């Protein structure tokens, strides 16, 4: 069988399954689930077969079907994402068979799940701008109905609407970017447009470089889809949808931003300024998402903000020129977050059985005859281990795997973040009350080494797979680079800030600063807490603005008699 | 005479402020079939009348330019007004006025009349279906004001599905023809106009989202009523499928 014949089946099978369910061909819940799961399974197997075929024989293909749109691009990016999306979809199908059994609209749910799978599969393999625009739009439409599955609850509808409106807002820059590219390069075909960009990247429109303008607009579209700061409010509130839908969204759909950056990588090679802006927005999102995650008391919403932080990091990676790393990140995060969501019910169940309140030191000391004060490593040893070990491990592993990458600024920044994250993890371990702190620290250090080496090796291999042309990767890193002196100053400044922060944290821990905040300190603390707990008042601002516009619209209608 | 022709066309292919009369005429007809027919016939008649008007390619460029801007303003104005409409009939009239006003942009840009007929039909057809469904709602629950008695999805699933699909078809959702004709417009028009036009799909989507809130969600609190008959739902589905076929088979209506 031809590769093309197999490839077209991948997005068509879930569509066919949805069609059968809508036409009521399978009767009864069991039959519906069987048809849907079988199609998801076959889709996954075919996607894996196509990926293996590419790994063994290579060959990028563009499939056209005679129309102005509907073409598919079978390149490493689409093939790896096909396997990933089909895999996640299969897991969610299997999970939903029993999870959704007692919900109303069982057939509708599976039909929509199949349509969503098909649309995403079309989207990631779109070889022309019209197909990309159509599928990009349709993902938002189908997601709206999936999120609003429980129609008895107005809250489900309200939060589905937030997603709907943010997605539609994000569609506008994508449409505009697509039209600019079509007008400038006289084609809808992505491979053709990219080839023409390489030939003439200096084209101008309204006095601005076309690629910079299109890149900026594409980044806005990616921000809306990947919940970047100020366009993120829909993400944590989508928890009112069924859990499988939350898992699908957090594991797959929200990653569309990373996909878009990689799909348009040949364009972003020429947009240094845009990549800097992408880095800044990603960084702000990563910090804000992680901070908001820490204060949530609802596990699913905390996971939502955690996704926001991760998406910020993924976008930041693109801003640094590490495009393949963003794809690796989105796949790793997808599987990790899907498992967390699908396991959230068990965690809640366990939490009901065991409250998880830490033991009272007085009780521990008197009744259990154990030391009330947890033993910890000496301060200097702990500080040395947490700050120095990660930087040594990260540097060595990267040096061994791909030494030449050390010349790229993006890699250095990512190593820097790896250092900060690693040190933070070790610091958290140091603060855990444990009887044997050395054993704990050594276990965590060993895990850290395994993870870093595995991650570095995988991401390097992944980069070679997605961008076999090393020059392309280098051009992306160079586009994201800044002047050497500014870079050195920035790195030194950041190092000083982080090291200073850790010193303060260690000292405050040792001397129990802040235990008795009073007066002005307490006021500041409460203000910051209020600001963060109200999610920076962003929802309130949007709410007031939209109410204002709706009042004006109503007034206009009253004046004109609703005609 | 030319002014009269253009004024008549501006009523049938609603252009502000004459769009007020278009809405008034449609609303004054009995709800249901009569209103739906008016939405199909009036815009097509407006296009036929435009043949008699002086052709825009002979106009000075500045006139054509201002004409286009005025049509875009009308479209934006009516889509903005649709945001606060909760009555299905009113909502449909405002939204279809917004879409039909764009016909003028195409006409002023020199788009062929045959293409404009399809353009107009793409908007009229789903809007006519919605007015038919609004008529059925008025008969069954006494009005088409959505959300007053809670969501309809659980009480009238066939009616809800029919309204939902027609609304999506009307509001430029792919792969319905309205999406492709709009895209076709974007394609042909000077790129400078596109940012203003792009606001339209956003406002339509906002209006759709608000309508769905009232249509789909919440428990139904009214008396028990019969759902839309299977035959009628099938007719709506068939009409939408036919339009879908048109947009796919026609390779996106002119793309």
Image: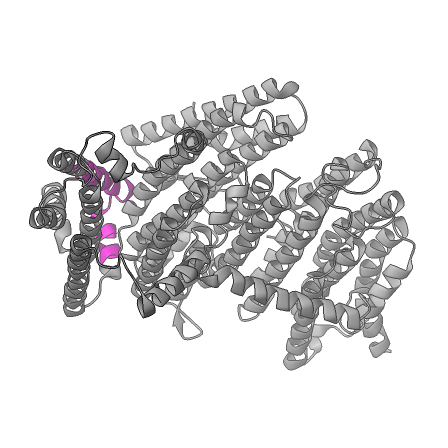
Question: Residue A478: percent from the left, percent from the top?
Answer: 22, 59
Is residue A260 at all visible to an observer of this figure? Answer: yes
Direction from residue B216 to residue A405 in the image, left or right: left
Left or right, A22 with respect to A442, comes to right
Residue A311 in sight here: no
x and y, in percent, of residue A522 in the image: 34, 64
Tell me where residue A377 appears, x and y as whole percent: 11, 43
Give, as a single range, the part of the protein colored magenta.
A451-477
Q: Is residue A303 above or below residue B231?
A: below
Residue A528 in picture, x, y percent from top left: 37, 63
Q: Quadrant of the N terminus of chain B?
A: bottom right
Q: Nearer the viewer, residue A261 or A65?
A: A261
Q: Quadrant of residue B38?
A: bottom right
In the image: residue B27, left or right of residue A148? right
Give the residue at x 62% y 52%.
B180
Whether residue B45 appears in magenta in the rendering, the answer is no
């Amino acid at each position: 069988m031809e590769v093309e014949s197999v490839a077209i089946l991948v997005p068509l099978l879930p569509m066919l399954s949805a069609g059968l369910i809508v036409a009521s061909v399978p009767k009864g819940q069991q039959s519906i689930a069987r048809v849907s799961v079988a199609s998801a399974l076959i889709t996954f197997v075919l996607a894996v077969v196509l990926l293996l075929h590419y790994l063994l024989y290579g060959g990028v293909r563009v499939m056209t079907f005679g129309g102005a749109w509907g073409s598919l691009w079978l390149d490493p990016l689409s093939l790896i994402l096909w396997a990933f999306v089909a895999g996640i979809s299969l897991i969610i199908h299997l999970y939903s068979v029993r999870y959704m059994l007692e919900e109303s609209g069982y057939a509708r749910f599976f039909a929509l799940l199949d349509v969503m799978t098909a649309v995403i599969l079309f989207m990631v393999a779109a070889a022309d701008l019209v197909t990309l625009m159509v599928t990009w739009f349709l993902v938002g439409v189908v997601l709206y109905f999936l999120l609003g599955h429980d129609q008895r609850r107005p809250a489900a509808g309200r939060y589905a609407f937030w997603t709907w409106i943010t997605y539609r807002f994000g569609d506008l820059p994508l449409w505009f970017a697509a039209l600019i590219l079509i007008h400038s390069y006289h084609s809808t075909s992505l491979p053709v447009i990219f080839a023409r960009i390489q030939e003439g990247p200096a084209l101008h429109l309204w006095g601005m470089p076309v690629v910079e303008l299109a890149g900026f607009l594409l980044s806005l579209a990616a921000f809306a889809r990947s919940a970047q700061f100020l366009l993120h409010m829909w993400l944590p509130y989508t928890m009112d949808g069924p859990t499988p839908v939350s898992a699908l969204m957090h594991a797959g759909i929200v990653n569309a931003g990373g996909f878009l950056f990689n799909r348009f990588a040949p364009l972003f090679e020429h947009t240094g300024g845009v990549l800097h802006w992408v880095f800044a927005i990603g960084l702000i999102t990563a910090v804000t998402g992680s901070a908001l995650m820490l204060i949530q008391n609802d596990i699913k919403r905390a996971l939502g903000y955690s996704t926001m932080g991760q998406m910020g990091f993924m976008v930041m990676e693109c801003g640094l020129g590490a495009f393949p790393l963003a794809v690796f990140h989105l796949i790793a995060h997808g599987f990790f977050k899907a498992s967390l969501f699908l396991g959230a019910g068990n965690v809640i169940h366990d939490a009901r059985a065991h409250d998880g309140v830490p033991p009272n030191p007085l009780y521990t000391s008197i009744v259990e005859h154990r030391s009330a004060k947890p033993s910890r490593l000496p301060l200097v040893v702990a500080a040395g281990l947490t700050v120095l070990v990660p930087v040594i491990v990260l540097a060595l592993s990267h040096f061994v795997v791909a030494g030449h990458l050390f010349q790229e600024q993006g890699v250095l920044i990512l190593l820097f973040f790896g250092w900060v994250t690693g040190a933070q993890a070790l610091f958290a371990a140091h603060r855990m009350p444990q009887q044997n702190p050395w054993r704990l620290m050594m276990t965590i250090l060993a895990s850290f080494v395994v993870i870093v080496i595995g991650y570095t090796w995988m991401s390097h291999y992944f980069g070679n797979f997605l961008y076999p042309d090393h020059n392309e990767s280098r051009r992306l890193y160079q586009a994201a680079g800044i002047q050497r002196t500014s870079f050195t100053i920035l790195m030194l400044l950041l190092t000083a800030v982080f090291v200073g922060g850790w010193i303060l944290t260690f000292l405050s821990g040792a001397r129990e600063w802040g235990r008795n905040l009073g007066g002005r300190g307490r006021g500041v603390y409460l203000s910051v807490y209020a600001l963060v707990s109200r999610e920076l008042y962003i929802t309130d601002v949007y709410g007031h603005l939209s109410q204002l516009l709706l009042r004006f619209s109503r007034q206009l209608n009253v004046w004109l008699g609703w005609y | 005479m030319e002014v009269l022709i253009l004024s008549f066309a501006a009523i049938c292919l609603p252009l502000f402020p004459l769009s007020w009369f278009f809405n008034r005429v449609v609303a004054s007809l009995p709800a249901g079939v009569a209103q739906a027919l008016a939405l199909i016939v009036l815009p097509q008649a407006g296009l036929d009348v435009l043949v008699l008007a002086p052709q825009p390619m002979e106009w000075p460029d500045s006139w054509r330019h201002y004409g286009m801007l005025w049509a875009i303003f009308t479209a934006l104005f009516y889509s903005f007004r649709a945001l606060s409409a909760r009555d299905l009939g009113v909502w449909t009239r405002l939204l279809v006025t917004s879409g039909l006003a764009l016909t003028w942009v195409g006409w002023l840009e020199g788009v062929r009349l045959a293409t404009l007929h399809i353009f107009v039909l793409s908007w009229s057809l789903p809007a006519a279906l919605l007015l038919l469904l609004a008529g059925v709602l008025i008969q069954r629950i006494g009005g088409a004001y959505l959300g007053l008695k809670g969501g309809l999805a659980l009480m009238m699933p066939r009616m809800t599905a029919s309204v939902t699909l027609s609304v999506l078809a009307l509001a430029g959702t792919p792969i319905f023809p309205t999406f492709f004709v709009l895209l076709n417009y974007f394609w042909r028009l000077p790129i400078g106009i596109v940012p203003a036009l792009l606001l339209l799909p956003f406002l339509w989507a906002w209006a759709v989202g608000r309508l769905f809130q009232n249509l789909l969600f919440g428990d139904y609190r009214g008396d028990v009523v019969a759902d839309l008959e299977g035959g009628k739902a099938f007719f709506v589905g068939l009409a939408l499928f036919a339009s879908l076929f048109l947009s796919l088979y026609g390779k996106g209506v002119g793309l």
